[in-house]
Amino acid sequence: MTLSNQRRLAWYRVPELWLFIVLIAATVIGTFSMMATALRQPDVHINVPNDVPRPSKIPPIWPATPAADVPTKPGDPMPPRP
């Protein structure tokens, strides 16, 4: 019996291929649904009272104020900027 005489199985009759197709389709659908959900949801701004600014590579807008000008209690007004 040679290879050309054997009956070939059609690709759509192989269950593993259908599983592969379903998994790839689910991945694509899940990716697009997560992107759509993420684009609809706004980013939540977390406000922490008395939070200290973290160092970053962005230069400050105003020069640093002396320690005496910093309010000591929450709710105290900041001195005006020059």
Image (cartoon, helix red, strand yellow):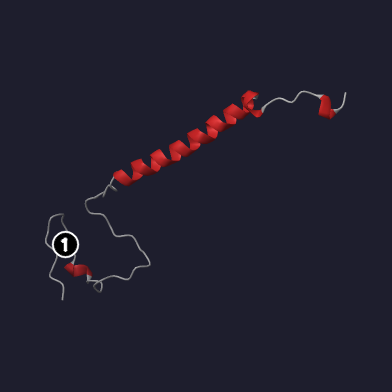
Mark 1 lies on residue = 71
Under mark 1, the amino acid is Pro
Is residue 41 shown above or below 54?
above
Q: Is residue 5 left or right of residue 70?
A: right
Image coordinates of residue 61 in percent, x first then y, are: 25, 71
Please tell me in which quadrant of the rendered image residue 71 appears. Answer: bottom left
Q: Name, please, the residue furthest toward the front.
A: 5
Image coordinates of residue 43 in percent, x first then y, are: 29, 48
Q: Is residue 6 left or right of residue 79?
A: right
Q: Residue at x 58, y 27 (%)?
A: 19
Image coordinates of residue 4 in percent, x first then y, are: 82, 29
Is residue 51 shown above or below 32?
below
- The residue closer to the viewer here, 17 or 60, is 17
- The residue closer to the viewer here, 19 or 5, is 5
Q: Is residue 37 left or right of residue 71?
A: right
- Quadrant housing the N terminus: top right
Q: Residue at x 32, y 71 (%)?
A: 59
